[in-house]
Image: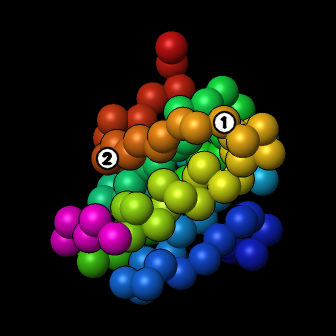
């Protein structure tokens, strides 16, 4: 299912998946963000939604969080514009599409 998205396997063997556009971001959050997963996003409007798939149920290690944050930044507009920004992460139950 993940081949249509941007993805990689972290150095600690977690699958990290990101949307290529706003439509894929919406699909990722609505369909594939499950309990235990982590949502990562660059602090920039229009950046990719990144999900760390956590099948273990254990806390996601900091190295994987860092790799996912770097992935989110590299696939955001900040990379091309050479803008210095940061990424943040939340647990699956803290994600809401209402604002």
Residue 27 locus on image (x, y percent)? 67, 48
For this rendering, which residue is in front, 1 or 71? 71
Residue 94 left/right relative to 18: left
Nearest to N terminus: mark 1 or mark 2? 1
Q: Is residue 90 left or right of residue 52?
A: left
> How far is disc 1 from disc 2 in space, using C-alphas?
26 Å
Asked which secondary structure carries label 2, the reply is strand
**Closest to the observer, 8 or 57:** 8
Magenta range is 58-63
In the rendered image of this protein, does residue 89 appear above or below residue 70?
A: above
Residue density around tag 2, few if under 14, some if 14–19, many if 20 or more, within 10 Å: some
Q: Are marks 1 and 2 in contact (CB under 8 Å)?
A: no
Give neighbour class at mark 1: few <14, some 14-19, many 20+ (Cα, 10 Å). few
- In the drawing, does residue 86 fall left or right of residue 30? left
Q: Residue 95, relative to residue 15: is it above or below? A: above
Label number found at residue 83: 1
Q: Give the residue displayed 71% in from the left and 66% down from the top.
A: 6
Disc 1 on helix, strand or loop? loop
Residue at image location 44% in from the left, 49% down from the top: 39
Query: Residue 30: image x %, image y %?
Result: 57, 44
Query: Mark 2 — residue?
Result: 91
Q: Position of residue 45 (x, y in %)?
A: 66, 27
């Amino acid at each position: 299912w993940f081949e249509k998205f941007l993805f990689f396997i972290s150095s600690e063997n977690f699958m990290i998946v990101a949307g290529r556009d706003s439509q894929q971001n919406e699909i990722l959050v609505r369909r594939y963000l499950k309990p235990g997963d982590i949502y990562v996003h660059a602090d920039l409007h229009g950046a990719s939604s990144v999900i760390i798939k956590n099948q273990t149920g254990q806390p996601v290690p900091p190295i994987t969080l860092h790799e996912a944050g770097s992935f989110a930044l590299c696939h955001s507009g900040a990379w091309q514009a050479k803008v210095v920004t940061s990424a943040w992460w939340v647990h699956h139950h803290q994600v809401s599409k209402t604002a």
